[in-house]
Amino acid sequence: MPLILATRNGHKLREFRRLLSVTELEPLPETVELPPETGETFVENALDKARAAAAETGRAAIADDSGIAADALGGRPGVRSARYAGEEASDEENLALLIEDVPPGSGLHYVCALVYVDPASGEERVFERRCDGVMSASRRGSGGFGYDPVFVPVDDVSGRTMAELSAAEKDAISHRGRALRAFEEWFTAER
Ligand code: IMP
């Protein structure tokens, strides 16, 4: 039985389908209302979404929440990454503000919490993974999205930003790739 992916973001559904091979994913039915992201942690937000989808559909669901934490900002913007420059801010506006606020060379961390909720058994599983990096001195590259043009991942020795990596190179080290692989490993062993 395919899992429900609790998101209204079509881009996310395509990305998850590309990265997940152990199970099929179904979009969230139109009738299900997702709760607003009001949690203080990525895990809370992801659990709120997956629980809502599982309760409404009676089916096992997964959901994720992700963002970026800057050492120079004491971990902000964190769960507010999509709204850093304002409630309706674009990726471009959020990126411009991070460049203003964060000094080059300081630590950045992408975090992704992926959760699984099964309403039949009551089982809930959390897979939180991160990708560490540093703030670039300038914005570089056109791949990826969001904060990728200034995020230099420490796991890639070339010094390129996330936006300069191929999709496969990003998937191999990204917070989302890691969380999805951890989920896949558990899900495969479970079945
Ligand atoms: P959400 O998980 O869709 O709520 O994403 C939260 C926000 O975190 C996005 O709007 C981006 O600003 C940021 N973000 C999360 N993952 C990435 C990534 O892989 N690259 C760049 N920005 C990201």
Image: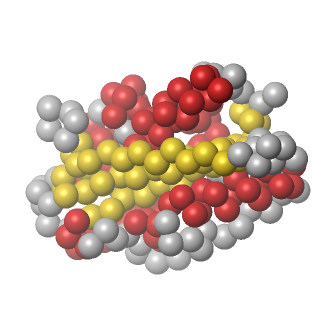
Name the residue nearer the viewer: 94 or 59: 59
- Classify residue 39 by image quadrant: bottom right
Name the residue nearer the viewer: 4 or 162: 4
Q: Quadrant of the C terminus?
A: top right
Residue 184: x and y in percent read: 56, 28
Q: Is residue 58 above or below residue 24?
A: below
Residue 131: x and y in percent read: 32, 45
Q: Is residue 122 above or below residue 178?
A: below
Instruction: Name which residue lies at 74% across and 36% down.
Output: 3
Residue 28 seen from this side = no
Q: Is residue 129 left or right of residue 101?
A: right
Instruction: Name which residue lies at 77% across and 49% down.
Output: 122
Residue 107: x and y in percent read: 19, 58
Name the residue nearer the viewer: 73 or 103: 73
Name the residue nearer the viewer: 57 or 190: 190
Q: Is residue 28 left or right of residue 189?
A: right
Q: Quadrant of the N terminus?
A: top right
Q: Is residue 169 above or below residue 55?
A: above
